[in-house]
Image (spheres, grey):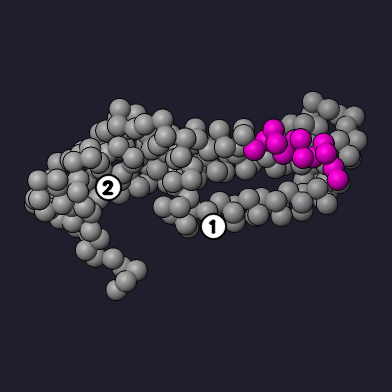
Amino acid sequence: MDYKSIEKLQTLLPLGYFYLIVLGILKDGVFFFALGINFIKFSSITDVLMSPISDITRYPILLVAVALIIYSLFLYNKFQINNSHKNWVRNSFAVKRFLNKNASATDQEVKNFIKNQFITSILIMIGCFFLGGGLGFGISARDRIKNNDMKFNYRITYDNGKDVDVYMIDSNSVYYFYVEKGQKNITITPAGSIEKIEIIKNRMLE
């Protein structure tokens, strides 16, 4: 058993989760910024810590996309390592910079450098994916509200018995963010004041 690899994995896992938490905060930040909302004011520490898991369970396609990105990068990285002696690899931007600073680098050192680029590439790609998704979803929700192109798929029952059909924007452990049918203003309601939420138009059951 390779105990060094296990120790390295134990070190990387908390760092990886922390990175996902930061990405979750930034993603929610750009999403709600597009709607004119400072989401930090309406989030608890639990929401922040659970944001990576929440995003993955909310959008299963996100998990599949991230897995495909990592696997694709792994295959490309392995392909580069196997061809590290070829000019097209050595003339690539990152490798060329490395060789300019380390003119006497051995082939093994070049391979090790390419291996290290794998982690960097993953961090950059996942970061772009999260931030791009957050901004895209935020702009899409904003445009739907501005153009009155909302789908009122949810019915909320308040604790006073009043029912309203809403366009659900998002929710966390403390608040719900939505637009009531017939309105264009975003409503932010504490979860405790809502008795029941119904999905009245569920495309998975149609």
In the image, 83: left or right of 161? right
At 86% from the left edge and 29% from the top edge, which residue is drawn?
103
Q: Amino acid at mark 2?
A: Ile
Q: Are marks 1 and 2 in contact (CB under 8 Å)?
A: no
Identify the residue at horizontal 71%, vertical 55% (top origin).
75
Q: Which residue corresponds to mark 1?
A: 64
Is 59 above or below relative to 119? below
Residue 6 within the segment the image draws in magenta: yes
What mark, if any, has residue 120 been given in the picture?
Answer: none
Region rendered in magenta: 1-13
Characterize the local packing of mark 1: few (<14), some (14-19) or many (20 or more) Cα atoms within 10 angstroms. few
Categorize mark 2 by other alpha carbons within 10 Å: few (<14), some (14-19), many (20+). Answer: many
Quadrant in the picture for residue 202: bottom left
Of 59 and 109, nearer the camera is 59
Of the residues under marks 1 and 2, which one precedes in the sequence? Answer: 1
Asked if one can make out residue 88 in the rendered structure from this viewpoint, the answer is no
Q: Is residue 175 magenta?
A: no
Q: How many marks?
A: 2
User: What residue did someone put label 2 on?
Assistant: 169
Percent position of residue 32, x then y: 31, 37
What's the magenta bit mostly, secondary-structure-wise?
A: helix
- Residue at position x 52%, y 53% from top? 63
Q: CA distance from mark 1 to mark 2?
A: 23 Å
Side of 165 where 171 appears, left or right: right
Q: Position of residue 9 (x, y in %)?
A: 72, 39
Q: State the SS at label 1.
A: helix
Along the horizontal axis of the image, is 43 left or right of 127? left
Residue displayed at 23% across by 58% down: 198
